[in-house]
């Protein structure tokens, strides 16, 4: 037997009388054989590649035979037509070929796909004979390979009825392996009742269609099939073989028998069903119509039975399609809407249309078919689905649905906004298109592991997850996973939240917490510094007493007070306030105190001390944008004379015994750190027995209550007058108690520093 290299071209006939069918697709080897590029022939008329004259007539006759055969037979038993002819290459050379035509499918009622198996005609040695039949035998192996992929039992028999080929489906239907079938006569597998009635088919030249056959399964049970057989006859009229297909209809036939035997019981089931049940015959005439059908469609049973189904429930625009589908089934035994759950539009008696879900099952009774339809009104479900789709589309988060293989099957509008892809660009793509490249390999494993033990849960708990936009940028995400497990397929629904803003907020919060911790640490340091600078105890003598107190605020300021003996005749007293908060002002307090104490060994007056202090601190204060207010007093213990100078600080209050008003001690002078070489005014006054002086920072007078009122100098004055005869410590305690009552608080926004000097 000669070996030929196969080349395949698929053509499409638009109508049965199409005189110039076009090339739909072809193998690279077929294009090479004819000298074309593969894409050059797509869409071109097939007459471009065959010769005119007798060869053209052969082509047209073969196409007509193939098309006529297709219209007369079940698709599972289509004929192949073959002939030898010349084909024309792109270079206009003619080559001898053998062509076998096989009808593949009918994509639409007006279109038919036909496969051309092209084999270069072999070069024969002298005396060697060649026939088309022997060449076409080479394609038989290809037919068998295709048959193995079919779910039905495909077979071939020799002219006497002995099996020469059997597809693997025979194992599922009869329990025998193909090897156990080959070489056996077909009647050996039939039950006794069919052996006699079907004996004549082997020698007959007539095809048979939808023949009910009773087989005996290998385990002994009876199997019912629907058999179709086609005789393969050569040009001389000789029967070459039989080719056919058996479809297992055991379950259907058992159901049919049970239906016939249990007519009354099924009648009750039909009437008690919640679904509308409609039965029609092969002419489309309604033969049964239950009570739910009456309620759904508005026609009574008596009105419906005997009328055409399309007149009752099918919108007029769909009548023609319904009729074509019915004719297609009666001609071929198959239909696109049969034996599956589908959604369609129906019409009520009043003309209103509504959505329904239905399943249609054909049932053969004798030589005729009936069709049972189970119909649900899904108007409410469609309304809810529409609302669900609206909710999904308007969701603030991205929603992505993928199937078991990780292919995207649905996205919402927010997915497009998050990732920058259009919906069309995402559907059908692997979900890893949305995952950064460095995570993709691991993501495939994670996805498969989730499908092994699926539960609704957040994805990547405790891990940082990122999405990948179309432009290549990444952004942090949070993903929730849910499983949608239906009869049709398993789907995973992912809800994706863009947490870029949240991450930024969390980072800002973390930084704020760090800053707060640093500030709190600095405050504690400043508080310790402030506490360490203040005198540890009052100074008391027979002639005077001086004491001070600092009440720190939540944020430490730069308050500072001090008193010390400059020499045996002089007592120096200082109160100061450094601008700002925390560690910086506290350090300036240290520097100020150090500078003042350094000057204490000399004989400097308050004004001289402030001038030296201003020049000493100017550079540091100017660079740091800080400044210091300070009041300096010097008391001469011998002659009771008080000298003082001011650097912009609130003036101290002097109260003499039995007076009702305090007097402010003030002198001209700029705050420290503004200008260099400032001249400070110095004033003096003599203190009488019983005089007291209050030095304070502005935290006292500027403390506010809930109504926004300041504590003010008037209240301070009144408290001093009221408690003038008490000790300095008692007066300070009275001031603080009145302040807390006024503000109704134990803490304040600014430090409050008090120092009282009293002459006995």
Image (cartoon, helix red, strand yellow):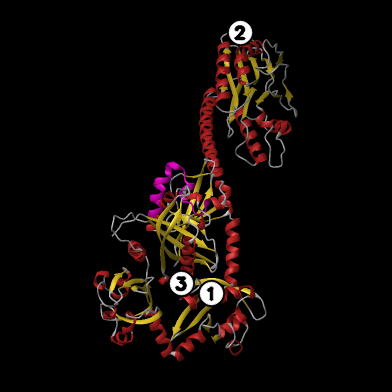
Residue 228, image x, y percentages: 39, 76
**What residue would you read off at disc 3?**
69
**What residue would you read off at disc 1?**
325
User: Which residue is painted at 63% across and 83% down in the image?
Assistant: 298
Between circles 2 and 1, the one closer to the viewer is 1
Residue 74, image x, y percentages: 44, 74
Q: Which residues are magenta?
A: 426-449
Alpha-carbon span between mark 2 and mark 1 = 121 Å
Q: Residues within 10 Å of mark 2 (few under 14, many from 20)?
A: few
Q: Which label is found at residue 603?
A: 2
Where is 348 relative to 265, above or below?
above
Between circles 2 and 3, the one closer to the viewer is 3
Where is 655 relative to 597, above or below?
below
Q: Secondary structure at mark 3?
A: helix
Q: Residues within 10 Å of mark 1 (few under 14, many from 20)?
A: some
Give yes or no for contact between labels 2 and 1 (Cβ–Cβ under 8 Å): no
- Name the quadrant containing residue 668: top right
User: Which residue is painted at 46% across and 69% down in the image?
Assistant: 65
* Sequence order check, earlier mark of 1 and 3: 3
Q: Is residue 325 left or right of residue 664?
A: left
Q: 258 and 266: which one is in front?
A: 258
Which quadrant of the figure contains the N terminus? bottom left
- Name the quadrant containing residue 19: bottom right
Q: Is residue 609 left or right of residue 661?
A: left
Residue 3, image x, y percentages: 31, 56
Residue 153, image x, y percentages: 34, 72
């Amino acid at each position: 037997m000669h070996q030929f290299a196969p080349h395949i071209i698929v053509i499409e006939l638009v109508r049965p009388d199409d005189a110039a069918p076009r090339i739909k697709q072809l193998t690279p080897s077929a294009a090479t054989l004819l000298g074309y590029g593969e894409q050059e022939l797509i869409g071109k008329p097939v007459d471009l590649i065959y010769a005119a004259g007798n060869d053209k007539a052969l082509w047209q006759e073969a196409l007509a035979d193939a098309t006529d055969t297709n219209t007369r037979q079940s698709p599972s038993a289509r004929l192949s037509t073959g002939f030898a002819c010349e084909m024309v290459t792109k270079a206009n050379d003619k080559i001898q070929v053998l062509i076998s035509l096989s009808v593949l499918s009918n994509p639409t009622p007006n279109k038919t796909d036909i496969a051309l198996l092209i084999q270069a005609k072999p070069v024969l040695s002298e005396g060697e004979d060649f026939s088309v039949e022997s060449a076409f035998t080479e394609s038989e192996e290809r037919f068998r390979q295709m048959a193995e992929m079919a779910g039905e039992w495909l077979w071939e028999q020799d002219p006497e009825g002995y099996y020469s080929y059997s597809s693997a489906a025979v194992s599922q239907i009869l329990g025998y392996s193909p090897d156990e079938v080959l070489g056996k006569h077909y009647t050996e597998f039939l039950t006794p009742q069919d052996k006699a009635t079907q004996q004549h088919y082997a020698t007959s030249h007539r095809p048979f269609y939808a023949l009910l056959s009773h087989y005996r399964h290998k385990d002994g049970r009876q199997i019912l099939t629907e058999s179709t057989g086609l005789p393969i006859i050569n040009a001389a009229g000789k029967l070459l073989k039989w080719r056919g297909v058996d479809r297992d209809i055991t379950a259907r036939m058992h159901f049919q028998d049970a239906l016939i035997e249990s007519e009354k019981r099924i009648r009750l089931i039909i009437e008690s069903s919640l679904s509308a049940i409609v039965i029609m015959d092969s002419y489309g005439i309604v033969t049964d119509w239950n009570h739910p059908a009456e309620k759904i469609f508005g026609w009574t049973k008596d009105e419906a039975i005997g009328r055409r189904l399309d007149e009752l429930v099918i919108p007029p625009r769909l009548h023609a399609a319904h009729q074509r589908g019915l004719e297609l089934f009666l001609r071929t035994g198959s239909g696109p809407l049969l034996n599956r759950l589908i959604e369609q539009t129906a019409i009520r008696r009043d003309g209103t249309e509504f959505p329904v879900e239905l399943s249609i099952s054909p049932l053969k009774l004798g030589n005729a078919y009936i069709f049972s339809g189970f119909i649900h009104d899904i108007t409410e479900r469609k309304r809810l689905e529409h609302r669900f789709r609206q909710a999904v589309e308007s969701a603030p988060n991205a929603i992505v649905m993928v199937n078991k293989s990780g292919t995207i099957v649905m996205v919402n509008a927010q997915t497009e906004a998050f990732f920058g892809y259009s919906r069309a660009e995402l559907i059908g793509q692997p979900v890893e298109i949305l995952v950064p490249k460095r995570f993709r390999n691991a993501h495939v494993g994670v996805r498969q592991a989730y499908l092994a033990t699926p539960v609704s849960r957040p994805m990547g708990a405790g891990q940082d997850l990122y999405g990948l936009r179309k432009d290549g940028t990444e952004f942090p995400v949070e993903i929730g996973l849910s499983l949608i497990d239906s009869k049709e397929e398993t789907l995973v629904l992912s809800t994706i939240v863009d947490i870029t803003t949240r991450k930024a907020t969390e980072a800002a919060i973390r930084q704020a917490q760090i800053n707060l911790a640093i500030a709190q640490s600095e405050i504690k340091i400043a508080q310790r510094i402030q506490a360490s600078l203040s005198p540890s105890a009052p100074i008391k003598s027979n002639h005077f007493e001086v004491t001070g107190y600092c009440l720190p605020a939540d944020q430490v300021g730069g308050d500072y007070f001090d008193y010390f003996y400059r020499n045996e005749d002089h007592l120096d007293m200082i109160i100061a306030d450094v601008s700002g908060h925390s560690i910086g002002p506290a350090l300036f307090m240290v520097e100020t105190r150090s500078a003042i104490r350094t000057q204490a060994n000399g004989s400097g007056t308050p004004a001289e001390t402030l001038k030296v202090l201003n020049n000493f601190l100017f550079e540091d204060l100017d660079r740091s944008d800080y400044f210091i207010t300070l009041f300096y007093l010097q008391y001469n213990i011998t002659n009771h004379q008080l000298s003082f100078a001011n650097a912009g600080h609130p003036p101290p209050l002097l109260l003499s015994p039995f007076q009702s008003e305090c007097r402010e001690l003030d002198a001209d002078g700029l705050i420290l750190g503004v200008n260099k070489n400032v001249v400070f005014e110095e004033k003096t006054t003599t203190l009488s027995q019983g005089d007291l002086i209050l030095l304070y920072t502005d935290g006292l007078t500027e403390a506010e209550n809930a109504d926004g009122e300041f504590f003010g100098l008037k209240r301070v004055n009144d408290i001093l007058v009221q408690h003038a005869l008490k000790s300095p410590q008692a007066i300070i305690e009275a001031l603080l108690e009145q302040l807390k009552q006024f503000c109704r608080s134990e803490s304040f926004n600014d430090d409050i520093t008090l120092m009282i000097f009293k002459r006995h």
